[in-house]
């Protein structure tokens, strides 16, 4: 099903999204990869605040290429989400609900998603030039020394995504493949 | 004897880093478009359409196809009648990578230490391979390699008794384990034989061989076709969302090996399998 949604990703909104939905996302999101997540989780462990308000926030796992003159941002496709699995439950426990990336997640991440009504969106891996088109504003907010891995605040319009895992734990990687194989076997 | 100044190699490496990262090779585009024509699922077709649109944007606007502009794998085939002058070859290659990644607005994705990390800031050092060949030319190939797919690669030292079936099972197991992580549809490079290290290098060379070409030995050429078909019967599909297209190509490279062994390495690459070659 095709859905146009506007952030923040409240619990109510999260529960309307289902694995397999084609979503066009508009609103403010934050970028972070493993090095940034490690710092954020260390900051939380010390009782410090995060560089952004995590409540109902969506984090995009991306390390963009540098912007050329006149560009908002360089190419900006998703990185492999599994590297953030160690940190994702902690991030959800402080309110961050949405994750944008690609690739499989560990069962403990899915359990945390069910507990906190999290949603895992997939952006098309390797489509960095296309995805950059929907990023309208980009602001560096923390960890500048990490270069491509620094924390950025982005404003995106109609970012094309798929719901891979929904807040009930349904998983497009499993259902999409099973559906394809079922249809193929019916034909043969 | 022909003299070539290493500064010429710097210039070519610089140019190839940028071109390889912004222009997908024609054979890879053809393979993706052919697979798009064969998909019937709505999601799978939509994903492949977006992938095609993406490399068209990269072509039109001279921007990187993917934000992971990779580690710069540089292969030099140096004619034995060439005398390189004007400086140190390794320094010249790294300077080409440094300039290419700076001028091309490419991402700097290299850390100076594997455990203690720390970005080198200029994407150096290059992963440099040199080979001495007959003649008086220098053939330079740059293949930027992203790590979403590199991380899903595998190597195994088989007993010879594992035979052909062992290799087949290993290929399918590696692709199955990779699943959605390496940005399918993927390119699968298989290196069989040699030593531990040579098998891995063969697998890397296999992903750089044009798609649609075959191993010269009909036995391995048939194995390439058979394994590509078996991989695409797994149903993983574009991005892992289910579908016919899990891989757009599978190339095998082989070498003689020891009586006691059968090394097999599998290098997984993504739909943005990039490489560009120039001859000096």
Image (cartoon, coloured by chain):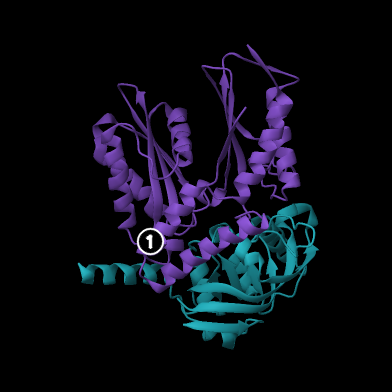
Where is residue B156, by image quadrant? top left
Q: Which residue is at the front of the view, B157 or B204?
A: B204
Q: Residue reaching furthest bottom?
A: A12
- Check disc 1 and report the residue beneath it: B236
The residue lying furthest to the left in this view is A188
Q: Residue at x 43, y 71 (%)?
A: B43
Left-right relation of B8 to B65? right
| Chain A, colour shown | cyan
Q: Position of residue A130 (x, y in %)?
A: 61, 65
> Compared with residue B209, is residue B83 higher up or lower down, i.e. above or below?
above
Circle 1 sits in a helix, a strand or a loop, which is it? loop
Q: Quadrant of residue B222?
A: top left
> A181 and A68: which one is in front?
A68
Q: Nearer the viewer, residue A127 or B195?
A: A127
- Closest to the observer: B270 or B11? B11
Q: Position of residue A168 (x, y in %)?
A: 46, 79
Dividing the picture into quadrants, the one containing residue A125 is bottom right
Crowd rating for badge 1 (residues with CA inside 10 Å; few <14, some 14–19, many 20+): many
**Residue A15 appears at what percent x and percent y?**
53, 85
Please tell me how many numbered marks the rendered image carries.
Answer: 1
Q: Decide if residue B203 is on the left or right side of residue B230.
A: right
Q: Name above or below for residue B264 compared with residue A77.
A: above
| Residue in view at x 33 percent, y 72 percent | A179
The residue sitting at 23% across, 68% down in the picture is A185
Q: Which chain is purple?
A: B
Residue at 28% across, 41% down: B223
């Amino acid at each position: 099903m095709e859905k146009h949604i506007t952030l923040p990703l409240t619990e109510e909104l999260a529960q309307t999204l289902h694995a397999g939905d084609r979503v066009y996302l508009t609103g403010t999101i934050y970028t972070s990869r493993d090095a940034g997540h490690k710092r954020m989780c260390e900051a939380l462990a010390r009782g410090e605040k995060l560089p952004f308000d995590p409540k109902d926030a969506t984090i995009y796992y991306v390390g963009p290429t540098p912007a050329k003159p006149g560009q908002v941002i360089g190419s900006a496709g998703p990185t492999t989400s599994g590297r953030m699995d160690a940190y994702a439950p902690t991030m959800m426990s402080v309110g961050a609900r949405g994750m944008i990336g690609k690739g499989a997640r560990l069962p403990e991440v899915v359990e945390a998603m069910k507990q906190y009504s999290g949603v895992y969106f997939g952006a098309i891996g390797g489509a960095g030039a296309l995805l950059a088109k929907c990023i309208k504003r980009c602001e560096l907010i923390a960890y500048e020394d990490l270069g491509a891995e620094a924390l950025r605040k982005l404003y995106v319009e109609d970012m094309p995504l798929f719901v891979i895992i929904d807040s009930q734990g349904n998983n497009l990687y499993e259902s999409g493949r099973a559906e394809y194989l079922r249809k193929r076997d019916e034909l043969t | 004897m022909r003299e070539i100044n290493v500064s010429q190699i710097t210039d070519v490496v610089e140019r190839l880093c940028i071109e390889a990262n912004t222009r997908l090779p024609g054979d890879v585009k053809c393979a993706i478009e052919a697979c798009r024509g064969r998909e019937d699922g709505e999601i799978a077709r939509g994903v492949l359409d977006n992938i095609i649109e993406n490399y068209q944007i990269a072509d039109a606007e001279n921007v990187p196809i993917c934000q992971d502009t990779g580690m710069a794998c540089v292969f030099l085939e140096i004619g034995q009648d060439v005398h390189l002058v004007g400086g140190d070859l390794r320094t010249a290659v790294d300077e080409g990578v440094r300039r290419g990644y700076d001028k091309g607005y490419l991402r700097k994705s290299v850390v100076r230490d594997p455990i203690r990390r720390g970005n080198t800031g200029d994407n150096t050092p290059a992963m440099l391979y040199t080979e001495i060949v007959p003649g008086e030319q220098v053939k330079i190939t740059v293949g930027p390699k992203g790590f979403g797919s590199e991380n899903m690669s595998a190597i195994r030292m088989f007993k010879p008794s594992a035979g052909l079936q062992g290799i087949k099972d290993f290929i399918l197991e590696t692709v199955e384990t990779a699943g959605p992580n390496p940005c399918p549809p993927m390119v699968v490079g298989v290196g069989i034989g040699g030593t531990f290290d040579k098998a891995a290098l063969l697998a890397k060379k296999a992903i750089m061989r044009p798609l649609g070409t075959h191993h010269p030995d009909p036995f391995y050429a048939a194995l390439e076709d058979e394994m590509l078909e078996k991989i695409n019967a797994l149903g993983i599909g574009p991005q892992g969302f289910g579908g016919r297209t899990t891989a757009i190509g599978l190339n095998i490279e082989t070498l003689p090996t020891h009586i006691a062994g059968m090394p097999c390495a599998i290098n997984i690459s993504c739909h943005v399998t990039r490489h560009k070659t120039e001859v000096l």
